Amino acid sequence: MSLPPCPSCKSEFVYQDQQHLVCPECSYEWNPVELEAEEKIIVKDANGTLLNEGDKVTVAKDLKIKGSSQVIKVGTKAMIRRIVEGKDHQLDCKVDGIGEMMVTAKFVKRA
């Protein structure tokens, strides 16, 4: 079983002490389960509802597609494939009638 490197100093010499992992070089201790929960990206839709991967959403306003003359109309359905951390587009979606594209979370509502 290989253990992840230390999140503090990136050292490979990590050992397990009950549920915690310990780095002997910088003396940092952490629980890998808690660390994974902290890294989860929190994204909310136009109404403030928390969005998760696999959720179905509808577009809340007309959206112009960059580099194209197409427009995604209000009410168009989409499915969230994955959530990424980014300034502009947080949702990697499959939009009905359009295909795969990145969409900003504040322009969709959970269906």
Image (spheres, rainbow, N blue to C red):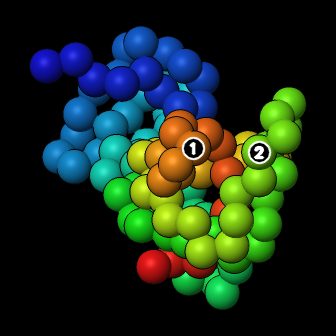
Tell me residue 1's x, y (percent). Answer: 13, 19
Dot 2 lies on which element? loop
Identify whether 90 is placed above or below 57: above
Q: Nearer the viewer, residue 8 or 56?
A: 56
Instruction: Kindly identify the residue that appears in the image at 45 percent across and 79 percent down.
Output: 111
Tell me residue 57's x, y (percent). Answer: 50, 69
Asked whether, in this view, residue 4 is left or right of residue 82, the answer is: left
User: Which residue in the protein does label 1 denote?
Assistant: 98
Q: Nearer the viewer, residue 68 or 93?
A: 68
- Judge the density around disc 2: few (<14), some (14-19), many (≥20) Cα neighbours within 10 Å: few
Residue closest to the far left: 1
* CA distance separating discs 1 and 2: 9 Å
Dot 1 lies on which element? loop
- Judge the density around disc 1: few (<14), some (14-19), many (≥20) Cα neighbours within 10 Å: few
Q: What amino acid type is highlighted by mark number 1?
A: Ile
Instruction: Kindly identify the residue that appears in the image at 50 percent across and 65 percent down.
Output: 77
The part of the image, by quadrant, that contains residue 86 is top right
The part of the image, by quadrant, that contains residue 67 is top right
Does any portion of residue 111 appear in the rendered image?
A: yes
Q: What amino acid type is highlighted by mark number 2?
A: Gln
User: Which residue in the protein does label 2 denote?
Assistant: 70
Instruction: Kindly identify the residue that appears in the image at 34 percent across and 45 percent down.
Output: 32
Tell me residue 50's x, y (percent). Answer: 52, 76
Does any portion of residue 107 appear in the rendered image?
A: no
Instruction: Kindly identify the residue that appears in the image at 52 percent across and 39 percent down.
Output: 99
Identify whether 106 is placed above or below 101: below
Mark 1 in CB contact with mark 2 (< 8 angstroms): yes
